[in-house]
Amino acid sequence: MTSLGVGNLGEFLREQRRQAQLSLRQLADAAGVSNPYLSQIERGLRKPSAEILQQIAKGLRISAETLYVQAGILDERSQDAGAEPPPGVRDAVLADPGLTEQQKQALLQIYDSFRKENP
């Protein structure tokens, strides 16, 4: 089987799964997808639908939008609903070596939710 150009998504999913300390089988069960299918996604052999990405995001406890951006379904800039955050906020969170990827994504989700509440 040939790669579908979703390798970055697969690598990202594998890293998120490892950060969450979940086995492939545990994440597949949590997301409601088969173990072989999830393995193929991680190896870049399958391109999951938005619905499957949403299920995987729930299993990883990260935002579905994060996976949509990784999969090329959503442009990273469109996550902010047109409002650009001050320069450096996202970069500072993402560059902090003292945080896990899961913690970084959680902080960015909270930050985005606060920004959406305030016009």
Image (cartoon, rainbow, N blue to C red):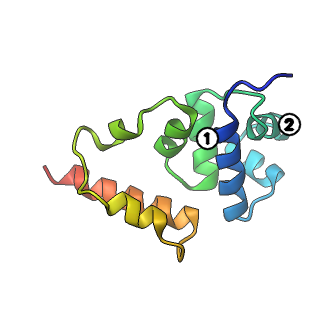
Residue 55: assigned label:
1
Quadrant where the image shows the N terminus = top right
Figure quadrant of residue 26: bottom right
Q: Quadrant of residue 18?
A: bottom right
How dense is the environment of label 2, judged by Cα within 10 Å: few (below 14), some, or many (20 and up)? few
**Badge 1 vs badge 2, beta-carbon distance below 8 Å:** no
Name the residue rendered at 75%, 41% in the picture. Answer: 42
Q: Is residue 25 above or below residue 104?
A: above
Q: Is residue 113 left or right of residue 58?
A: left
Three-letter code for the amino acid on which mark 2 is drawn: Pro
Residue 54 horizontal/vertical position (percent)? 56, 39
Residue 20: tell me if it is visible.
Answer: no
In front of the other: 56 or 82: 82
Q: Relative to 53, is 80 on the left or the right?
A: left
Instruction: Tell me the residue that label 2 is attached to.
Output: 36
The extreme bottom residue here reads 98
Q: Could you tell me the amino acid type at mark 1?
A: Gln
- Mark in front: 1 vs 2: 2
Residue at the (27%, 39%) spot, across then down: 81
Residue 19 position (above or below residue 15) = below
User: Residue 96, labelled with which disc?
Assistant: none
| Side (left or right) of 118 relative to 110 | left
Query: From the viewer's perspective, is residue 67 above or below residue 27?
Result: above
Percent coordinates x, y for residue 91 in the rendering: 39, 60
For label 2, the SS is helix
The x, y position of residue 7, in whole percent, is: 70, 36
Precedes in sequence: disc 1 or disc 2: 2
Residue 80 screen position, x and y as percent = 30, 43
Judging depth in this view, the residue of 32 and 69 nearest the camera is 69
Residue drawn at (76%, 47%) of the image: 29
